[in-house]
């Protein structure tokens, strides 16, 4: 009987513990989360979008003044957003004048439907449309200017240029060949004279 009573108490305590854990976990699972941003995180844009926005998994709480914040900071450190946040369903947006080239940082904060605050940051890069066009045009026109034909040279200048480029004839090959022939003839003559003297001595 005592054993059954202990089992009943243990079962009751276990049930109460599991119920408490379930109640504690439910609010945590209900917290909203960031679903998407515009511009997207890491995106490069070439035109001023006029506004920056984020979209949550659920509509945020709007009854607390200043609870929802979107701040866009330009590369030079100035705040490019207006400071006013508009909530449309799950989307929070703010007007922003994006006119500085470089990386912009967005800090956001919102209050979930369960009253839990969430926050985060993301960034995007603004690059002026057509940047580098003038440089590319200059590079394209420079070779054309370099290739502009000049006026033809006069006959006298052409003859002088040809004479300068031709230069004196190179006779090194002929001199080398003549030297080799002379050496061969000298060796042949010496051999014949030596052989002649040897024949005379033997006679």
Image (cartoon, rainbow, N blue to C red):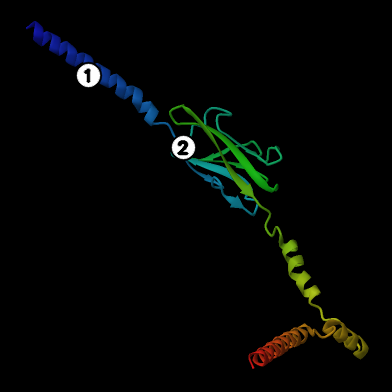
> Are dots 1 and 2 in contact, CB under 8 Å?
no
Q: Position of residue 112 (x, y in %)?
A: 46, 31
Which residue is drawn at the image coordinates 69% and 48% (left, top)? 101
Q: Position of residue 24 (x, y in %)?
A: 35, 22
Q: Position of residue 153 (x, y in %)?
A: 89, 86
Q: Determine if residue 152 is in view.
A: no
Which residue is drawn at the image coordinates 80% and 73% (left, top)? 146
Residue in front for this viewpoint, 153 or 46: 153
Q: Secondary structure at mark 1?
A: helix
Which residue is drawn at the image coordinates 85% and 83% (left, top)? 167
Residue 94 placement, left or right of 152:
left
Residue in front for this viewpoint, 182 or 43: 182
The image shows residue 127, relative to residue 75, as above or below, that is: below
User: Which residue does the numbered mark 1 point to in the structure image?
Assistant: 15
Residue 155 placement, left or right of 113:
right
Q: Split into 4 quadrants, where in the image is the C terminus?
A: bottom right
Give the residue furthest to the top.
2
Which residue is drawn at the image coordinates 73% and 69% (left, top)? 140
User: Which residue does the numbered mark 2 point to in the structure image?
Assistant: 59
């Amino acid at each position: 009987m005592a054993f059954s009573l202990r089992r009943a108490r243990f079962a009751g305590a276990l049930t109460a513990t599991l119920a408490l854990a379930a109640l504690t976990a439910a609010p945590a699972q209900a917290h909203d989360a960031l679903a998407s941003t515009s511009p997207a995180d890491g995106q490069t844009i070439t035109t001023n979008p006029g506004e920056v926005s984020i979209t949550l998994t659920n509509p945020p709480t709007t009854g607390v003044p200043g609870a929802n914040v979107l701040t866009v900071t330009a590369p030079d450190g100035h705040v490019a957003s207006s400071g006013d946040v508009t909530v449309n369903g799950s989307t929070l947006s703010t007007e922003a004048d994006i006119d500085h080239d470089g990386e912009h940082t967005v800090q956001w904060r919102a209050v979930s439907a369960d009253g839990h605050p969430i926050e985060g940051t993301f960034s995007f890069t603004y690059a002026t449309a057509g940047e580098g066009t003038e440089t590319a045009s200059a590079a394209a026109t420079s070779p054309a200017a370099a290739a502009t034909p000049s006026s033809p040279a006069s006959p006298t200048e052409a003859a002088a240029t040809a004479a300068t480029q031709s230069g004196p004839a190179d006779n090194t090959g002929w001199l080398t060949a003549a030297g080799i022939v002379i050496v061969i003839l000298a060796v042949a003559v010496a051999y014949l004279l030596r052989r002649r003297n040897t024949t005379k001595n033997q006679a």
